[in-house]
Image (cartoon, rainbow, N blue to C red):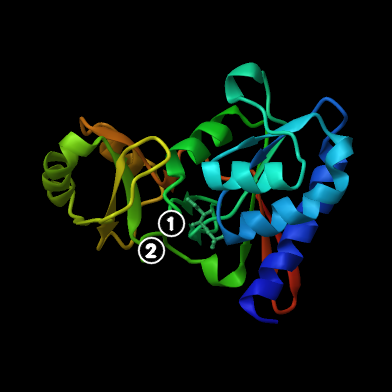
Amino acid sequence: MDQNQLKLAVANAAVDYSLTRIDQRSVIGIGTGSTANFFIDAIAAHRHKFAGTVASSSASEERLKALDIPVLELNSVAEITVYVDGADEINPQLQLIKGGGAALTREKIVAAVAREFVCIADQSKWVEHLGAFPLPVEVIPMARSYVARELLKLGGDPVWRDGVVTDNGNVIIDVHGLLPIAADGSLERAINQITGVVTNGLFALKPASLVLLGTDSGIQTHHC
Ligand code: 5RP
């Protein structure tokens, strides 16, 4: 199977799983990216089985609305039953690097509210140690150079993602050279302490609850 077929298979598996968790009052958190898009397309056939969705990006919101799937404001929602999203890297502790699509801050907010975070990915995202994929950091624009200097002090090699503006009006710095990232959450905390950082794409302190991984030999299920 090629990568897109694996993404489709895992998105379908996530729909089957979500249907076992939701009822008519449930709100589903929706991620961002190509794997999340397969999930959006597949959940559309079941749009009458839940109350609505919260989107982690404007792009996902548009796709949901085009398929007549209700999109709710997070501030009007008390709980998200299940949040389904992709990742750029996943380790065996189900910690993630996210933000390749620049939606990391809203993704982290939706993950914080969700009762369960189901991460869906093809097998290429599974790694022993996080950090080969450059870690995205969302930064207030005027703090860009200062934050880059502070990231250098933490041992990273910061690269401004030129031309990219997030849904929140901020910029992204991708931090290279961090492999291996320790699994203790210290780097996630340290980067978030830098003034001017909105958040970073490391999901180490609150990993995924469940990972569905599309592989050549079928869907693998990894629990926390
Ligand atoms: C967006 C993300 C995506 O989940 C991540 O980049 C994976 O994307 P894809 O499913 O296209 O491989 O974190 O900010």
Where residue 198 appears, as percent x and y from the top left, is 32, 33
Q: Are marks 1 and 2 in contact (CB under 8 Å)?
A: yes
SS for dot 2: loop
Q: Residue at x 75, y 67 (%)?
A: 9
Q: Which residue is mark 1?
A: 100
* Residue 97 placement (x, y as % from top left): 44, 53
Q: Is residue 205 left or right of residue 17?
A: left
Residue 154 position (above or below residue 123): above
Q: Amino acid at mark 1?
A: Gly
Q: Give the left or right position of residue 223, taking residue 164 as reference.
A: right
- Residue 48 is marked as none
Residue at (18, 42) in percent of width and height: 144
Number of numbered discs on residues: 2
Give the residue at mark 2: 133
Q: Quadrant of the N terminus?
A: bottom right
Observer-nearest residue: 134 or 53? 53
